[in-house]
Each structure stands twice: as C-alpha cells, then as structure tokens.
Image (cartoon, helix red, strand yellow):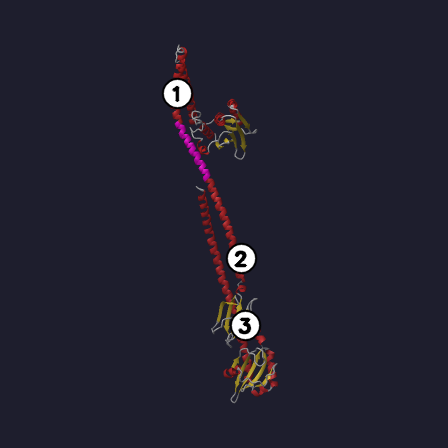
C-alpha cells in the first residue's frame, strides 16, 4: 500500500469520526439552546405583559377614584355652597387629607368664569370659555384633559365634572399633581435601560420619559393606532433594539408605553448561550484532537503491520524458493555425482596405466598427462559444486551444542590468514569479551563464517581490510557477528538477489553462487537471520544475528 493510500485512509477515518461525533453534538446543543431561548423569551414577554396590564389597571383605577371624588363633591353640593371659598377650602383640605393627588380645586360657571378657587395659583376670575377642555367637559359631562400649559405656563392636566341643574350648569374642576401621576407611570420602568411613559392620540408625550424627550415632546416611536388589548413587539429606537409593550387606558385616550432592553432582559439567556458555546467549542476541540491522534495511531499501527507482513511474505517466498531449489539441487547432484565418480575412476585408471606402462617415451605423453590433470581438476571442481548442492538440499536438523561464537569465528579466520597475508589484507578483530555462549551448531556456523569471509577476501582482492566484530543485545536476546570488507561494494540493484542460488558477482569460473544461499539456509535453520549493508565504493557488511537461548 502506498503512502498516499494511508493518508487517504487516515482522512476518511477522521472525517467519519468527526461526522458521527460532531453532528449529534451540534444537534443537541442547538436543540437545547433553541428550547431554552423559546421558553425564556416567552417568559420575558409574559412578564412584560403582566407588568404593563397591572400598571394600566392601576392608572385606570386612579382616574376612577379621582373622577368619583370630583363627581361626589359636585353632586352633593350646590353652586352657592361651593362658591364660598372658605367652605371650598375646608372641603379641599378634607379631600387632601385622604389623597394628595389634587393640586387645586375650582368652580367655573357656564360662561367659563372661574368663580371660586382654592390652590397655589391666582386663577379666580379667569375665563375658560375658549379653552378646549371647557368645550369638551360641557359637551361630555366628565373630562380628563391632555397635558397643556394653561394660564400658569406649566405642564399639567385637569379632571372636570359638569353639574347640570334645571336653571344652570356649572363645572367643578381639579388639577392633578403631575409628579404623583408620573411616579405611578414610572413604577413600570424596569432595569437600567427600561422606560415607561404615556402618549396621547397625537403621539405627544404626557409624562416625562426616562431617556430622551420631555413632556409634550413627540416621542421617537411610530404613531400608535387604536387597538384592543395589549401589544408586544420588538422595534429599533435610536439605533438600538428595544422590546415595546403598549396598551390604551380605559378612561382616557392615552397610550401607556413600556420599553425594555432585550439584552438586559435576556442577559441570563446570553450567558447561557456563551456557556453552551464554550462547552461546545471545548468539546469540538477535544473530539478533533482525539480523532486526529486516534486516526494517526490506527494508520501507524496499520503501516507497521503491513511492513511486518511484507517482511514475512518475503521470508516465506525466500524459504519456498530455497526449498524448491534444494529439491532440484539434490536431484541434479545425485544424477551428476555418479557420472563424475565413473569419470574420476577412469581418469585414475588412465593415470595408473601411464605410470605402469612405457608410455612416458611417447611423444604425446605430456599432452596425455595434462589432459588427465585437467580431468582431475574439473572433476574435483564439479564434485565440490555437487557437494555444496547436497549441503544446500540437506534436511538434517542442526546439532544443538553450547557454542562460543568468538572462538568459532577466530578458528575460521585462522583458516584464511595465510590467504589474507598473501594478498596483503589485514583482518581486524573487535570481539566482545563477555559474549554469551549460545546453543547452536558450531560446524554449520563455521561454514557460514567461512563462506562470508571468503567472499570478503575475494571482494577486497588485495591491500585492504576485513573487520570482524561481535556484539550482544540484551533487549533482543541475540548476538550479532559483523563481517565488513573494504571492497567495491555490491550494486543496489543486486542486493535483493545475492541470496539466490547460483547468483554471483564474481567473474565466470571463480564462484558457484551457492555460498550465500547455503549460509542463508543454515542461519535460518539455526533460528537467526542474515542482513547486508553495502555501498558502492565503500565496502559491504554482512551481519549474522543468532538467538541467545
């Protein structure tokens, strides 16, 4: 499997894991937040509706009580009684003792003349014939005015009641204390940015709002049409979103307006949203990191497994190839050995004849002798090949004995010291003193060392170095025997074939190509392995790994 396939697999694992993890997480978070938002918003609107309607009922009750008081006085007294300002003063004090909501009290005849007055202003004698409120109260009988400036040049509003008698009509009028009325309206202001005020049909302020315009100013809100009940709606005022609640009063065509700041009212919801968002983001970060590490761990484990499988497959192929070729070699060796034996015997017989008979005087004796020598030489060479083929194909189990690998290696090197000295090749030894003694087959190990040492000396040719080194790994429980040479090295393209039978890098006629194959087979039977490292121009190192038992 190529590396890009692992990357694709890792990306698919990350995508699937994130998909199955994050989609439910986001769905759950959004559902919880939506349900909480709906519930909290409904609760906020219901709270505003209750506040608005309670305040409307309180104001209507205030007007009912004031109208009832004025009407009671007007219909339980005569005009003559009320024109007596001393009597009117006592009556006004009596009313004030129960309620401070009246500023003054006055009696006005049908001509609009202020015939009696008690209060802080000098209004006796003032004529109201042309005033709007006078015309309205004469027409309706009971009237609550809008806020107006009047003769005192101060914003105020009045409540007036008409008393109709058979011969005359007169009016009892009282001015309402605007501070008391405004305090009643402002009781509906909530929060730091909430507001409450009253506007008339023309959208003119009748009380002073908490922010913005003064009384009698035009409120910065859409003009309100008549509507029944209570209305709640969001809108934008001065560039900021507000929640507007409005309801018309019952006794006067005034609109009670209450403003609430949604951010302030929904602050708990916003805090909950921030907490949920933080929890979700933390969860997403945790899931993403966990998924990436998990996917990387899975793909890394898969890569290791594939590599181990590839090595195992390669070893199985090599073993199968060795077994098949071993059978073939055994058959060939068996078939070739018999003819070689016959040729060898006949060559010896001819040599005996040449020695026993007087053929030495023959002028072709020298050629006969050379031919016999060549026959002997090539028969011996052929027998060595068949001997190694038989050794390669041999199915004998290794002998188990305690083996000092350093000693076997030194003895083997001793066999080749004369050859190395003749070629001016230095054999260097770096053997571990306390190398563990292993259970193995010393004869077969000697054959392996001999094959590799011969190859190393042949590779160096002359004037070089062959280095022997033994090491021990307690972690792997194995010893390693390294045989390095300063020869020309093995081309990289040939490294995968050097253990194949009959494959050799030596010139034709100088190698059989069986030494490394036989060595590979022997070491494998002994439970070890052979590795090779080579770089062209810098030599080759064979390492025999043997288990410590």
From this view, report whether residue 302 is shown above or below residue 19. above
Range of residues picked out in magenta: 306-328
Of label 2 and label 3, which has the lower sequence position?
Answer: 3
Q: Nearer the viewer, mark 1 or mark 3?
A: 1
Q: Nearer the viewer, mark 2 or mark 3?
A: 3
270 sits to left or right of 362: right
Tell me the tag on residue 270. Answer: none
State the separation of the CA atoms marked 1 and 3. Answer: 128 Å
Tell me the tag on residue 197. Answer: 3
257 sits to left or right of 121: left
Query: On the image, numbered disc 1 is attached to which residue?
Result: 340
The residue positioned 52% from the left and 53% from the top of the image is: 282
Residue 79: quadrant of the picture = bottom right
Secondary structure under the numbered disc 2 in the rendered image: helix
User: What secondary structure predominates along the stretch shown in magenta?
Assistant: helix
Q: Nearer the viewer, residue 371 or 406?
A: 371
Residue 538: give x, y in percent of width and height. 51, 32
501 sits to left or right of 185: left
The residue positioned 50% from the left and 52% from the top of the image is: 284
């Amino acid at each position: 499997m190529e590396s890009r396939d692992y990357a694709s697999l890792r990306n698919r694992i990350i995508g699937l894991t994130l998909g199955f993890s994050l989609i439910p997480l986001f769905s759950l978070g959004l559902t919880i937040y939506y349900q909480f938002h709906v519930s909290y918003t409904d609760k906020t609107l219901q709270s505003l509706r209750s506040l608005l309607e309670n305040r409307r009922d309180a104001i209507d009750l205030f007007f009912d009580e004031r109208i009832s008081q004025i009407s009671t006085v007007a219909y339980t007294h005569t005009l003559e009684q009320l024109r007596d300002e001393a009597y009117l003063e006592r009556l006004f004090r009596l009313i004030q003792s129960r309620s401070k909501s009246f500023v003054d009290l006055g009696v006005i005849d049908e001509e609009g003349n202020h015939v009696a007055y008690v209060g802080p202003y000098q209004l006796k004698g003032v004529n109201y014939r042309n005033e709007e409120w006078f015309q309205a109260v004469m027409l309706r009988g009971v009237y609550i005015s809008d806020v107006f400036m009047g003769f005192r040049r101060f914003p105020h509003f009045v409540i007036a009641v008409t008393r109709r008698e058979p011969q005359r009509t007169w009016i009892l009028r009282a001015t309402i204390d605007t501070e008391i009325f405004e305090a009643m309206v402002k009781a509906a202001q909530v929060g730091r940015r909430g507001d409450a005020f009253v506007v008339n049909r023309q959208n003119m302020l009748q009380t002073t709002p908490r922010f913005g315009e003064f009384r009698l100013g035009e409120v910065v809100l859409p003009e309100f049409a008549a509507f029944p009940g209570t209305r709640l709606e969001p809108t934008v005022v001065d560039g900021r979103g507000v929640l507007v609640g409005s309801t018309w009063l019952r006794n006067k065509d005034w609109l009670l307006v209450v403003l609430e700041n949604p951010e302030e009212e929904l602050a708990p919801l916003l805090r909950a949203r921030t907490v949920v968002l933080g929890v979700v983001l933390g969860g997403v970060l945790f899931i993403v990191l966990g998924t990436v590490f998990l996917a990387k761990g899975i793909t890394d484990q898969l890569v290791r497994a594939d590599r181990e499988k590839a090595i195992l497959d390669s070893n199985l192929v090599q073993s199968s190839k060795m077994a098949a070729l071993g059978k073939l070699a055994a058959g060939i060796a068996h078939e070739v050995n018999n003819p070689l034996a016959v040729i060898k015997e006949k060559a010896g017989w001819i040599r005996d004849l040449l020695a026993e008979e007087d053929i030495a005087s023959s002028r072709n004796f020298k050629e006969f002798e050379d031919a016999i020598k060549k026959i002997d030489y090539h028969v011996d060479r052929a027998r060595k090949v068949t001997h190694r083929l038989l050794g390669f194909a041999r199915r004998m189990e290794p002998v188990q004995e305690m083996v000092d690998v350093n000693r076997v290696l030194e003895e083997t090197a001793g066999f080749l010291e004369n050859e190395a000295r003749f070629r001016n090749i230095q054999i260097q030894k770096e053997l571990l003193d306390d190398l563990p003694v292993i259970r193995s087959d010393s004869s077969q190990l000697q054959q392996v060392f001999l094959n590799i040492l011969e190859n190393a000396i042949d590779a160096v040719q002359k004037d070089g170095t062959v280095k022997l080194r033994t090491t021990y790994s307690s972690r792997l429980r194995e010893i390693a025997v390294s045989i390095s040479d300063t020869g020309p090295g093995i081309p990289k393209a040939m490294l995968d074939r050097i253990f194949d039978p009959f494959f050799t890098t030596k010139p034709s006629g100088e190698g059989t190509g069986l030494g490394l194959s036989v060595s590979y087979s022997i070491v494998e039977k002994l439970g070890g392995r052979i590795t090779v490292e080579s770089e062209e121009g810098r030599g080759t190192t064979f390492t025999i790994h043997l288990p410590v038992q």
